[in-house]
Image (cartoon, rainbow, N blue to C red):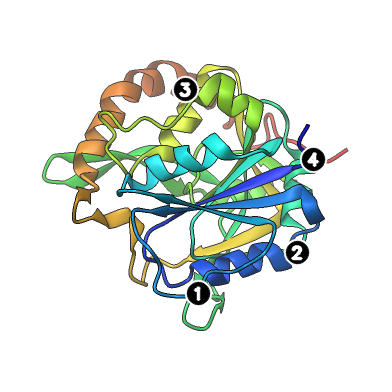
């Protein structure tokens, strides 16, 4: 039986911050040999030297599969009791892995408090963190709509003293889930309809809610994700495998909008709106 507690999956496509992200994961881990990092090189060979450490495993995908396919490939060889997915341009708080695995319940998806990273200085930006997000359907103009997370600071303020809270949306750049929940409920990230890149957080959250699970934010730890002002790599896809983001947005709405409107919104109207404090969690 594997003694791996947490498998951290990193889908990687030509990002110059990959090694720095790996270093942050290793430096701030408190699981020792209970951590493994699985880096999925998505159809490319890096021009820089990779980090050599027994806790880091590299797999090379012979051709570009996109972010969804790279995550699936990493999960398929992971050995941890829990799975963590992170982008390759993030930094992490000390003990992130111990704290998240100690508090993640069997039917939860958990994301930490999210800060914003200046990747040039490799430090936190002076912007308040994100604790609460509501799931909305955003009008992008020209008839284009999409599921999106909307910052929910009023609820964050009401729940400021609660270390673990229920949420409606997450960015998707870092989350943790039990391996069993992934196998039994998520299965894999689909590429048919969704395309190779977008709406992965919507898919895993919707599947979790349908199965009676919850999306939680654990404020006992944090990570910082590269701010949107800096250039992207993977999310734009590759020349041979473009992201097709508008098609992905439309497909996610086709699959999940009826469930969102008929089931989730009525349920959330009661759960989230009664004094702003219904169904929240305190550490025992």
- The picture places residue 122, in percent across and down from the top left corner, at 55, 78
Give the residue number, with chain letter if any, for mark 2.
94
Residue depth check, mark 3 versus mark 2: number of the one nearer the observer:
2
Apparent side of residue 185 relative to residue 142 in the rendered image (left or right): right
Q: Are marks 2 and 1 in contact (CB under 8 Å)?
A: no
Label 2 – label 4 distance at C-alpha: 21 Å
Give the residue number, with chain letter if any, for mark 1.
49
* Sequence-first tag of 3 and 2: 2
Label 3 – label 4 distance at C-alpha: 38 Å
* Sequence-first tag of 1 and 3: 1
User: Does residue 119 sit above or below 266 in this rendering?
Assistant: below
Report crowding for label 1: few under 14, some 14 to 19, many 20 or more residues within 10 A (C-alpha).
few
Q: Residue 200 versus residue 221: which sits nearer the camera?
A: 200
Numbered disc 4: secondary structure? loop
User: Does residue 123 sit above or below 69 in this rendering?
Assistant: below
Numbered disc 2: secondary structure? loop
Label 1 – label 3 distance at C-alpha: 46 Å
Give the residue number, with chain letter if any, for mark 4.
3
- Quadrant occupied by the N terminus: top right
Q: Residue at x 80, y 56 (%)?
A: 32
* Sequence-first tag of 3 and 4: 4
Numbered disc 1: secondary structure? loop
Give the residue number, with chain letter if any, for mark 3.
264
- The picture places residue 94, in percent across and down from the top left corner, at 75, 64
* View extreme (left): residue: 142
Residue depth check, mark 3 versus mark 4: number of the one nearer the observer:
4
- Quadrant occupied by the C terminus: top right
């Amino acid at each position: 039986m594997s003694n791996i507690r947490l498998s951290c999956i990193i889908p990687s496509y030509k990002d110059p911050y990959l090694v720095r992200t790996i270093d942050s994961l290793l430096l701030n881990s408190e699981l020792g040999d209970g951590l493994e990092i699985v880096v999925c090189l998505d159809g490319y060979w890096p021009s820089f030297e990779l980090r050599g450490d027994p806790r880091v495993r590299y797999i090379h995908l012979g051709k570009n599969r996109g972010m969804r396919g790279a995550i699936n490939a990493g999960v398929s060889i992971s050995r941890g009791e829990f799975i963590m997915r992170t982008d390759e341009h993030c930094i992490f708080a000390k003990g992130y892995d111990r704290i998240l695995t100690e508090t993640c319940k069997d039917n939860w998806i958990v994301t930490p408090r999210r800060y914003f990273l200046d990747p040039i200085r490799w430090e936190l930006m002076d912007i308040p963190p994100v604790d609460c997000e509501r799931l909305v359907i955003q009008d992008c103009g020209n008839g284009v709509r999409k599921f999106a997370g909307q910052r929910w600071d009023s609820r964050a303020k009401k729940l400021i003293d609660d270390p673990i809270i229920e949420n409606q949306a997450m960015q998707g750049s870092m989350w943790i889930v039990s391996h069993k929940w992934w196998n039994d409920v998520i299965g894999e990230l689909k590429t048919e309809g969704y395309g190779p890149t977008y709406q992965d957080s919507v898919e895993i959250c919707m599947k979790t809610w349908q199965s009676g699970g919850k999306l939680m934010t654990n404020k006992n730890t944090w990570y910082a994700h590269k701010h949107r002002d800096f250039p992207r790599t993977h999310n734009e896809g590759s020349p041979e495998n473009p992201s097709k983001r508008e098609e992905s947005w439309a497909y996610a709405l086709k699959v999940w909008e009826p469930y969102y409107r008929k089931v989730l919104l009525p349920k959330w109207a009661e759960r989230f709106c009664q004094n702003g404090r219904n169904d929240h969690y305190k550490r025992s």
